[in-house]
Structure formats: C-alpha cells, structure tokens
Image (cartoon, grey):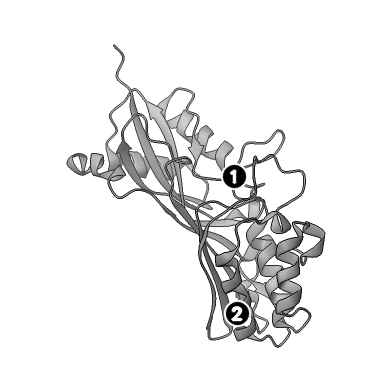
C-alpha cells in the first residue's frame, strides 16, 4: 500500500499582485502559484486546499492550505526549498503533519480579519491601508460594530450572485482600535461571505463620518439588501490575520518536530 501523508502549510502573502487566492483561468492567483511551486519541488502534481478564499488585492498574515504527498518531508529543508521557489510576495512559514481526514477549510473553527485605515496621508501605507482624510467618530463605529454580534444574517454585506446556501455567520468579535494615525478594525467569525468585511468597513466608516446613524444601520442589517449598505472599502487594507483550528489537530505533529 502506497504511503500517503497530509500536511498543513502555514503561509503569509502580500496580495497586491494576485487575483485573489483561488485558481482562475488566465489569472495569477496565490493558489495557482503555490500549486505550481509544490509541483516543482515534489516532482508530481500537488493540488492544495486553502482555509478560505481571499479576494484580489487582499493580504494574509496567516493562511493555511493542505496537500498530500507520498513523501515524509523534512520540515526545515522543505520550507527552505519551497521559499526558494515561491515569489517574494508569498512566504511558507510552517509545516504540520496532520491526520488524513484533516481539512484546512472545514476544520477551521474561526477566522480573523483586520482592516487598516490611516487618517494622515502616508506613502508607506499605500497598498496596505486605506487613507481616510475625514474626521471620524470611533465611538460611534464601535457602538454599531457591537450590533454585528447580535446579527445572524449578513446578506446585506455579501456580494450579489454568490454561490452559498445561506448568509448566516456567527460574529464573535468586532471592534475598532486606534494606534497613532491608524485605525484597525478587528472581526472574528466562524465564516465570512464574499466581500463581507470590506462592505462592513465601508458602511461603518460612513457612520463614523456622520452619514449614518444607529437607526440607519439597523435598517441596513434587516434589509438583506446589499445596495442598502455602503460601498466596499478597497482591498489593500484587508488582511486575513488568523485561522483557528481545534487545539488537538496539531498534536499529531508533536512527535515529528
């Protein structure tokens, strides 16, 4: 019987030059580049499955993907060789051996995104933060963000014509913090809809500028209509920050490190 092993690969990437995570015809994506690099290194076709999709221009501080191979890999050597093949805007950070039934997408229990907004023009934030030249009410935005924790259906913040069975998400955290000239929006949920975080950010910033109040925001949530919410914030300020798994998933890996 042929030996097979499944691995989880932890990644980071700057999404500026990619058309998102998922493989697409006639487009350079993170998944397609990763699969090509793994195929070169392992000398056989090596498809991967990510923990979730990120859109064009969105970054990842932490992303996971699983793949299978008939080799038992030397972790340090494998990472060194893979990083030598990957382009400069993708980094392989860690490798974990996992049970064959483990799944990078379906075993994830939560995902955290961060969205960065800067309030003073700064060329070094370009492509990694959204410049907002207006005065904003951070307290108002946090008051409305707390309403998201009590909401179940988020169709009003989902891209239209998306192929999902339902629009329910369980948001566990949603808040803004300010650090110097930057504001950071943190949001943690069990799942996210396409375009959801950027739509939420765009809508909350309208409220912060005094364009919406609590009553307006409540009506948007209840409308289930994307056209009622604000325009999506640009992709460059959005980062997939963390993907959480059951704590025992990686215990399989302890005796191999």
Quarter of the figure that contains the C terminus:
top left
Quarter location, residue 62: bottom left
Residue 152 horizontal/vertical position (percent): 60, 57
> Which mark, residue 122?
none
Q: Nearer the viewer, mark 2 or mark 1?
A: 2
- Mark closest to the chain's N terminus, 2 or 1: 1
User: Looking at the image, is 251 positioned above or below residue 141?
Assistant: above
> Which mark, residue 21?
1
Residue in the image at 62% along x and 66% along y? 237
Circle 1 — which element? Answer: loop
Quarter of the figure that contains the N terminus:
top left
State if disc 1 and disc 2 touch (CB < 8 Å).
no
103 displayed left or right of 254: right
Residue in the image at 42% along x and 45% along y? 83
226 displayed left or right of 196: right
Q: Residues within 10 Å of mark 2 (few under 14, many from 20)?
A: some
Quarter location, residue 121: bottom right
Residue found farthest to the right:
227
In 3D space, how far apart are the residues under numbered discs 2 and 1 (Cα atoms)? 33 Å
- Answer yes or no: is residue 215 visible: yes
Residue 190 horizontal/vertical position (percent): 50, 53
Residue 173 horizontal/vertical position (percent): 49, 67
User: Looking at the image, is 40 positioned above or below residue 147?
Assistant: above
Frontmost residue, 2 versus 163:
163
Determine which residue is flagged by label 2: 143
Residue 129 horizontal/vertical position (percent): 62, 70
Frontmost residue, 136 versus 63:
136
């Amino acid at each position: 019987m042929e030996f097979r092993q499944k691995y989880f690969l932890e990644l980071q990437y700057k999404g500026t030059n990619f058309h998102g995570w998922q493989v697409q015809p006639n487009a350079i994506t993170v998944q397609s580049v990763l699969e090509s690099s793994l195929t070169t290194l392992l000398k056989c076709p090596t498809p991967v499955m990510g923990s979730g999709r990120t859109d064009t221009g969105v970054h990842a501080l932490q992303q996971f993907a699983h793949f299978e191979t008939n080799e038992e890999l030397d972790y340090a050597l494998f990472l060194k060789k893979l990083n030598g093949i990957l382009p400069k805007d993708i980094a392989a950070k860690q490798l974990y051996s996992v049970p064959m039934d483990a799944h990078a997408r379906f075993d994830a229990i939560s995902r955290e995104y961060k969205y960065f907004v800067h309030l003073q023009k700064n060329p070094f934030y370009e492509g990694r933060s959204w410049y907002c030249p207006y005065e904003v009410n951070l307290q108002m935005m946090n008051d409305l963000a707390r309403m998201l924790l009590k909401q179940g259906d988020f169709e009003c913040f989902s891209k239209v014509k998306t192929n999902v069975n339902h629009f329910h998400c369980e948001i566990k955290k949603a808040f803004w913090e300010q650090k110097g000239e930057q504001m950071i929006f943190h949001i943690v949920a069990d799942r996210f809809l396409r375009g959801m975080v950027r739509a939420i950010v765009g809508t909350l910033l309208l409220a912060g500028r005094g364009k919406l109040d609590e009553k307006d925001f409540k009506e948007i949530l209840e409308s289930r209509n994307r056209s009622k919410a604000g325009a999506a914030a640009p992709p460059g300020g959005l980062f997939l920050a963390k993907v959480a798994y059951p704590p025992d998933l990686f215990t399989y890996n302890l005796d191999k490190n």
